[in-house]
Amino acid sequence: MMPQGEKTSLKRGSILVCLLMLLPAANGRGAVTSLESDSLRVQVNNETGQWTLVDKRSGVQWPSDGTASPGNSSRLQGVFAASGDAQKNTLRLAGEKGGAVVFSLVDGGRALELRYENAGDETIRVLGDALTITDAQDGYAIVPSREGLLVPVKNDKAFKRMFGTSEYEGCHMNMLGFVKKSSALIVTWDDAYVFPEIERTVSGNEHKLTAVFELRRSARLVRLMPLGKGDWNTVASEYRRYAEGRGFAVTLREKIKRDPHVERMVGASNAKLWTCLNRRMNEESTAEESVKVQWTFDEAARIAEHLRKDLGIERCFFMMGGWTEGGYDVRHPDNLPANPECGGNEALADAVKRIQSLNYIGCLHDNVQDMYRDAKSWSPDFIEKNADGSLIAGGRWLGGRAYMVCAPKQLELAQRTQNLSAIHDLFSPWAYFVDTTYAVPPRECYDPTHPIGRNDDIAWKIRLSDYGRNLFGIFGSECGREWALPHSDFFEGLVGVSGHYYHQLKPEELGAQVIPFFEMVYHDCQVCYGKYGYRADEAAEYVAHHVLCARPLHYHSFPDHLYWQSRPEKRANPSADLACYTRSDNGWAEGLHPYDVFLKNTHEVLGAINEVTAYNRLTEFRYLSDNGAVRQAVYGEGDEATRITVNFGQTPVEVTSQTGGRTVLPPWGFLTESPRLIAFYATRWNGRDYPNAALFTLRPTDNKPLKDSGSIRIFHAFGPTTLVWAGKSYEVEREEVIKPWPQ
């Protein structure tokens, strides 16, 4: 059974009523100091530094049994003594080995902060005992990696894994959430040298979940914020409050005020031609191994025109890669002129103009982190250095072996007159994408002329983001990190990778469940997509995941050239369930190219869902079945809320529709209901059975709620064509605008 929680209404404020009390220790060793507010009570042994935290609203103690260590490092060994000026909300303990730990109540008394002083260069390990969760406490941890992971204590998969700050598939927000005995707690931090490690141990029928925080180098504090009775919804809601105070939660409405073009990204599918010019170099970047033009710039524009005019795709974020002089991932950072193989500067400028004349967002793909030895600007001076002075190499990509440009040098290169400013002047795209910036872990460089640490790396990448955004208007990068939210407009790769939830991380190996935690915190703050190509005839679970997350899909596997003018060979015997969104029987896209069938079907659903949810958080997520297969996400609140129910199981399930009554969802089926959208993939809805399932959407054309609308557009993707609405039956083969009420 999936862990269940209670939705709890928390006080938005907490009056700080801190008490500094000296009490005799229960074991007779040292006095005990008590720090207390409306939210929590902390008791600290002045001599040992051992401590406990009690959540006063739930009565739950962290740790549940015994006391927690002040931290583990050589300077924190031995006896402590209170030192410094006494303050009612702070206790400073100085250790005999030279280190010190400061206990403070912060954030208006909502949180306990542990801060370390005089720690030198030592790594401190802390909270491993404080955050232990056992079977009896029926709890879990929440990890903000991509969309999010729910890691329950009750699972037989033993593991140990580090989720470093801003690491690739590490912690993409500076927090972890914990729930035990239906009581919630958040741990937060500020420094990129914090490395949380989560471990589940299994001994017979006993399970234990622990989280240890390694504080390296400049990382010297963590905060614990008890939330009272609650669950993952409580954790998300309270962390959003905290994030707003830290300046992370810049909303889409604010970003649209800054650049109105951002509004065109709401509900927009991500169509990307990755490698217009696909040139492959050898390892040393000294010789070509192959060259292939996959799309000329004219063909790219014609694809966009095909999507708009032939498929009726009104909103699209259209990106081109491989436009640069060498082709995709070749000869960076020297991009200009646009490669002649695909048409050169004039053809690219014309393509961008034509794409944006469709009211699509035109975007160019760039990279200023990877440098290749055959680049005109190649110089070791730009490259990150190891401590011994050697160059730091990156991946082996199309351009050969890449070398990692140091973050301040990335900005320097981007600001050259022949780089971003010239690209803007020549082509004028409304958006710009700089690859890898948000994806790679924070970097270190030991070059004495530009040394940086992990925090410096992030700071320089923020400057790069701001520069690109101020120049082009809309800016984004790969994967996505919390710190980038105020400095960008879109992430590519946060929602999923190559048709999967993650790139390298495998949730099943951790006994973990993917949950849409990012949407619970930041859905209304950023346009987000997945990344890389995937097979449409294996994508049903991936589509279902995007339905639950209320995110449009990324289409990164376009066939070469003017693909719709030919018919590819069909794949033999794809799984009917996994290929369900490639169906077109009796529907809108019947007879079209298979790629267009999948694109049209999924865009009509996911674009519409994103449009009605984009300005709201996911406010309530819950499991509707004991096995966790049936999941529901509610975006917004009250009468304007959107309710999404998805069946991730292998058998049909019955759910109740507010408008359609008894509804049956097949594997990967869904039901979405909001005042201005109904969408379903079901075998029964509104009294009508659909053998082999059908997919419909209903949207008002007059912007009234559907129940009051006199003009409703019905889209039919596949399956039986009959739809019942307001007591009448309608036959819809492709799409129809119906008039349910007398005009």
Image (cartoon, rainbow, N blue to C red):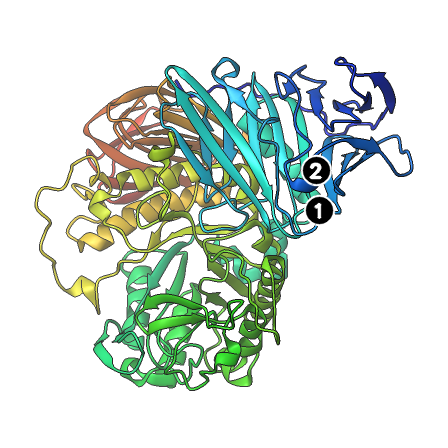
| Residue 76: mark | 2
Q: Residue at x 37, y 29 (%)?
A: 511
Mark 2 in CB contact with mark 1 (< 8 angstroms): yes
**Pick the front one: 539 or 346:** 539
Using the rendered image of the protein, determine whether residue 698 is visible from the camera's viewpoint.
no
| Quadrant into which the C terminus falls | top left
Q: Residue at x 44, y 83 (%)?
A: 378
Q: Residue at x 44, y 50 (%)?
A: 267
Q: Left or right: 510 with respect to 692?
A: right
Q: Position of residue 269 (x, y in %)?
A: 38, 54
**Pick the front one: 701 or 621:** 621
Label 2: how many residues lie within 10 Å, few (<14), some (14-19) or many (20+)?
Answer: many
Using the rendered image of the protein, determine whether residue 216 is visible from the camera's viewpoint.
yes
Q: Left or right: 513 with respect to 247?
A: left
Q: Amino acid at mark 2?
A: Leu
Q: Is residue 373 above or below residue 363?
A: below
**Pick the front one: 97 or 602:** 97
- Tell me which label, 2 or 1, sits earlier in the chain: 2
Q: Amino acid at mark 1?
A: Ala
Label 1: how many residues lie within 10 Å, few (<14), some (14-19) or many (20+)?
Answer: many
Q: Residue at x 74, y 29 (%)?
A: 49
> In the rendered image, which residue does mark 1 sit on?
119
Q: Left or right: 229 with respect to 379?
A: right
Q: Position of residue 232 (x, y in %)?
A: 54, 28
Residue 316: name its quadrant.
bottom left
Q: Position of residue 313 (x, y in %)?
A: 35, 55
Residue 454: name its quadrant.
bottom right
Residue 415: name its quadrant.
bottom right
| Quadrant into which the N terminus falls | top left
Kind of element beneath mark 1 = loop
Kind of element beneath mark 2 = helix
